[in-house]
Amino acid sequence: MGSIQLKGVRKDFGTVAVIKGVDLDIKDGEFVVFVGPSGCGKSTLLRLIAGLEDATGGQVLIDGKDVTEVGPSERGLAMVFQSYALYPHMSVRKNIAFPLMMAKTPKDQIDAKVAKAAATLNLGDYLDRRPGQLSGGQRQRVAIGRAIVRDPTAFLFDEPLSNLDAALRVQMRVEIGELHGQLKKTMIYVTHDQVEAMTMADKIVVLDKGAVAQVGSPLTLYNKPDNLFVARFIGSPTMNVLSGAAAAKRGAASIGVRPEHVDVSTTAGEWKAKVRLAEHLGSDTFVHADVEGAGQMTVRREGEAALHAGDTIYLTPQEPRVHRFDAAGLRVA
Amino acid sequence: MATRQGQALGRLAVAPAVAALAAWSIVPLALAIYYAFLHYQLDNPDNTFFAGWSNFYYFVTDPFFAKDLFNTVALVLLVLAITIAGGVLLAILLDRPMWGQGIVRVMVISPFFIMPTVSALVWKNLMMHPVYGFFAHVWRAFGLTPVDWFASIPLLSVGIIVGWQWLPFATLILLTALQSLDLEQKDAAQMDGAGTVDFFRHITLPHLMRPITVVILIETIFLLNVFAEIKVTSVGGLAGNLTYLVFSQLNDANDVGEAAAGGLIAVVLANLVSAFLVRIVGRNLEA
Amino acid sequence: MARRESLAKKSAWTLVAWAIGFVMFFPIFWTGIAAFKSEADAYSLPRTWLTSPWTLENFAIVQARSNYLQYVFNTTVIAVLSTLLGLAFAIPAAWGMAFQPETKPSVNLSGKAWALILLFFFAVTAAIALSVGWRMTDNPLLGLALILLFGLPIAAWVWTRRTGDKLLWMLSTKMMPPAGALIPIYLIFNRNGLVFRQWGGVDLGDWNLIDTFAGMVPLMMLLNLPIVIWMLYTYFKEIPFEILEAARMDGAGLWQELSKVLAPMAVPGIASTLLLNVILSWNEAFWTLNLTNKNAAPLSFFISEYSSPEGQFWAKLSAASLMAIAPIMVLGWFSQRQLVRGLTFGAVK
């Protein structure tokens, strides 16, 4: 079992409210990602669940039990830290075995569990090394190994991939996803990277300035962002947001249209624009264009498009894909 | 960051040290103020009464006071001059590639680990004795009249001893700082065509400014309180400092009140200096 | 060509450096030579140091005449006990300040308000003291009460500061010149400070801490405590807090977190701190000269006895000095880096 509920959780540092009352329902076995820009409180929220910070108000429930006043060592959760936080004076074997030793597990069981975790994570050859002798990816695996051996109620990941290089990050992303598939345990994962959020999550929680901006599946957030903040945060390149005549015509204070939902023509269309820069990636072409009377827009074309700086083009949004927002930035249905 | 329970535990853990140091700094201060206004002589304790400011008056008008105040400052400045100038040179020298660097380093820093009474007596006798000392032999070898160090130039003599003890400290700190000088900076400066002198003036010296300040301030704390070297070489009458004067008020004159008043004056002097120190070290702490 | 030039350069630097190194080391070297000469030869050392006979008699005589080993014992007891006592205070303090720092003052009063409070308490203290004729000799309880009245607001101010200010305040206690504390400590050590001999009918005339370990060990501990705390603090600061949090997540209780995770990582820092503190207290020579003379007198006092004109035996002075400095010098060689860090309060590493 591993369901987690937050009820009106608040956290103040002095007079500054870092978490402004968060309600959240995480079901057993879900992979939930907290995402948001730096300073939005996502790490603090994770630490509140872990018990490493205590809440100023509200309740944290694990499997229906109120654990708000329970210390981190008794919540039965496992955490993978950004810096991995491996014990530098212990071998890999001891690092992984440490939670089991704390739980006073019999020695033969510890050995068996460590061996199993090491096999799962391809760490068999490194068990007698110190963390200092391992590469970043290997350290990451040890940290995960340390988390899985104790069979926790839920796993907490605090930006675990941010210290790895790009290639390794993709690989570890896949591995963590597979791990979730195997273990079928609740996982809460904090990241500032929306690609990680989109690819890994069953459910994404977007946080903005200490409050939940939207909760939903990756595609819900992509297709139906509740507000401008989510609309801009999810999706790459960023959604184009236009106000003025184009918005007024559609009965909104501002409209958003994703770069991949704009049709490009060299002859006619809604907006006349001039290409400033075309980025040819092979699989895609990103066109940055100056739209007359509406500012800058980014357009994504699949494959290679024969567009170059200085070309005049016409842009037309795909009407069903236009998102409308009111003056407060909330979605207009 | 962290929990209320952790915070409480942290405060609890800090409490004994704060209490000990608070007692250590407050009780003597309170008592010193008490004594400083008390007419109280160890050999006549029954005739003890409130003395007003007279202890301060007598201490300040003591013929030794002006001289010893001057000596206190002069000794600090003299030793600082020796250790900073010597320290920069030695640090740069030790930073060069050479054979047996470790041994040279050990030889240079050794004086710092010599207890003050030992270095004072070794210098006074083996080195500076006017007849049998090493310097006397050297002087005579060159046909010169040996110097009677402690009789003719007592302050300088004490300064040399104390300077010898503290030169390693300055060297060690400046060397540590020098070794943290970015190697790429050296390469870049060479690419830019900087010569040795330019490099020293524009790169090395500015880089050493912070550690030099640290050295000055820390040495000053200790140098204001030089005592053993003066007492053991018996130059208290000729080149005593404030610390020594307070000691002799207690030891020779048995006058608690006046000694306490002198001690408070030393406290004020040290506080003026340390106000600067706290500020600068504090700035480094935040960085 | 270039290589040969740099070889020549290196040789030149080596020569200069060795020469200067030897000059710095010379007084120690010379002491070492004199220690192995007869008294008569020690006075003509510069001419005869290679030719005159070598002898070990000085060491035997120093021990026989003055019970040298007793002083070694005293020095060691003071240095080691004060260091251990200091660590008992400093380790929790450094832990608390490094891992549970207070970023804000716990009581929010302006500097002006504090100054007024302190001034008020000082004035009240002084007024009461003056009203009884400034004499606490007859009334020890009143004296203690006045010290409390004077000290409590200061202690309260310190206690409510944030961690960074607490550290700076600790440092500032190190700047208290010994001359200022000499008189009070001297009187506390031999006559209760307030100069009373009776307290509620109990005769305290025999109260004495002068020349005792009971006096010297705590005193030495307090002298070095700020340095010890600072040094440990800078070491603890380098241990990532996340590792301790990881231990918590792994189910470790406080004691296990401290003993299984923090302690093994802190051992090198604690060892360096211990080493530096032993060196500092071994060489301390203000309080030892003023407050000891026999029973708890350490080596620095013992050597100072050679300053009297009748004590002028160079060879024996050298032998005694050599024995007094050798162990600590060797320790010092091994702790150069820690020394820099400890004595600069972490400002230079």
Image (cartoon, coloured by chain):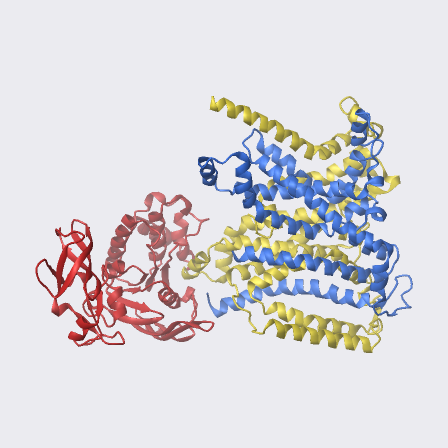
Chain colours: A red, B blue, C yellow
From the viewer's perspective, tell me whether residue C299 is left or right of residue C255: right
Res C53 visible: no
Q: Could you say which quadrant of the image residue C92 lies in? A: bottom right
Where residue B249 sits in the image (x, y, percent)?
Answer: 85, 57
Q: Residue most toward the left?
A: A267
Name the residue located 27 percent from the left edge and 71 percent from the top edge.
A214
Q: Could you say which quadrant of the image residue A274 lies in? A: bottom left
Q: How many numbered dots are placed on residues in this image?
A: 0
Where residue C238 sits in the image (x, y, percent)?
Answer: 50, 53
From the viewer's perspective, tell me whether residue A72 is left or right of residue C33: left
Name the residue located 61 percent from the left edge and 71 percent from the top edge.
C111
Name the residue located 75 percent from the left edge and 47 percent from the top edge.
B75
Q: Is residue B143 above or below residue C78?
A: above
Res A223 visible: yes
From the viewer's perspective, tell me whether residue B161 is left or right of residue A164: right
Q: Could you say which quadrant of the image residue C97 lies in? A: bottom right
Where residue A327 sits in the image (x, y, percent)?
Answer: 25, 76
Which residue is nearer to you in this view: A90 or A164?
A164
Where residue B112 sits in the image (x, y, percent)?
Answer: 68, 42
Q: Is residue B159 above or below residue A78?
A: above
Q: Is residue C224 above or below residue A42?
A: above
Q: Is residue B115 above or below residue C30?
A: below
From the viewer's perspective, tell me whether residue C214 is left or right of residue C239: right
